[in-house]
Image (tube, grey):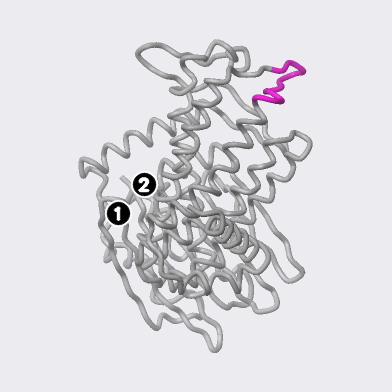
Amino acid sequence: MSEAVAAAQTQSLLARIKGLLLKPRQEWPVIAGERTSIGGLMLSYVAVIAAIPVLAQMIGMLVFGISVLGVTYRPPIMTTLAGALGQYVLSLIAVGVIAVMIDVLAPKFGGRRNLTQAFKVAAYGSTAAWLAGAAALLPAISFLAILGAYSLYLLYLGLPVLMEAPKEKALAYTAVVVILAGLLFVVAGAITRPLMARPHGAALSGAFAGSVLSQDRVSLPTGRVSLPGGRQVDLGEMQQAVARAEKMTRNARDGAAAVVAAEKLAEFLPASIGHYRQVSAESSSVGTIELDGSRAEARYVLDDQYIELSVTDIPMAGPMAAIGAAMQVRGERKTATGYERTHVVDGAFVAEEWDQTTGQGSYTTMAGERFLITATGKVADMKELKAAVAAARPDRIARLAG
């Protein structure tokens, strides 16, 4: 490769990063129209940007080490290199897995399946998170890691453009992708981390009192871990959730985790919600090697206001939701006209969005650790959306999980 070509590719890469970070609304339509292959995008963009956090973390560990209670530990070079290589490979695989999720979920949110476009969203949407990984290089700038959350915004803007999903469903689409992808990798990390740490487990055994590494079985640490904000994670519950994830994966592989028929889900959509009357309804199912699911949705109207109520069955969401609940996942963003909030209520995920100016919002909860019940629309207040979800009888839907 000549220096001129290399320079041109570098400029193109930098221009793309700048566009995504500074002008994402204008950049996504440009990306949507570009003709590229998954392999080409993987080599020219993902393989380069995904290396940033890996290299930063590797250099940071070798130079600054790991500090715990005033004691600094610097892992051996070969150990660090092996870990970095494993992390890098998993990062590349992660993009592909997220792309498949985005592609399979597209029809459920009014979009169109296109794996290449889904891969673009997964690859370019991860840009901010990868760049934020550079914070691992210097402890003094570790607070910059929070900028990685900007990738959620990139995903939110990119999904409706590339997957042709309605904008009003972009938040729900984003939430489902983030929850499924995030919790899937928590499961993967919880399973693989002890395995990767086994050869050198004794070096930091004091930091994980109660963890057991035997030749026959790998056990996760036990006890509770404190998180910022006073929250605690019960590692025992986390281990149980991982075990359930393994069992559900086997059931899915053996055909034992049957998806509830969309027609059955439709029975939980009432003919009316208060003064709102049902004007249309539809249901669909998808069955692939990557993901099984079904969905029923209905639209309700009252004068110029409306509610769209849906019930979605995603069996593989069960163990992921359990892990998220154990981690007490939550987040909130307030604006001058409303808010966006994700939290856990009675062990179930809840996602809310409300804009007081437009009177539009959405409310999503989970029943039976696998059924997503979502109400979106233009209403008088959030109470009407919550009432719509309650009208679907989440307690009875949960019984379908068996």
Q: Is residue 128 above or below residue 209?
A: below
Q: Find disc 2 in the rendering and name its residue.
A: 316
Of 230 and 266, which appears nearest the observer? Answer: 230
Q: Is residue 306 above or below residue 59?
A: below
- Element type where label 1 sits in the image: strand
On the image, which quarter does residue 242 sit in? Answer: top left
Of 296 and 175, which appears nearest the observer? Answer: 175
Q: Is residue 71 above or below residue 390?
A: above
Residue 393 in picture, x, y percent from top left = 43, 60
Quadrant placement of the C terminus? top left
Q: Find disc 1 in the rendering and name its residue.
A: 292
Of 270 and 288, which appears nearest the observer? Answer: 288
Is disc 2 surrounded by few (<14), some (14 to 19) or many (20+) residues within 10 Å?
Answer: many
Give the residues in magenta: 62-72
Residue under the point 52% across and 59% down: 5
Residue 400 in picture, x, y percent from top left = 32, 51
Mark 1 near mark 2, Cβ–Cβ under 8 Å?
A: yes
Of 304 and 274, which appears nearest the observer? Answer: 304
Residue 36 in picture, x, y percent from top left = 40, 65
For the image shown, how many numbered marks are present on the structure? 2
Report if residue 294 lies within the magenta region: no
Residue under the point 46% across and 66% down: 391
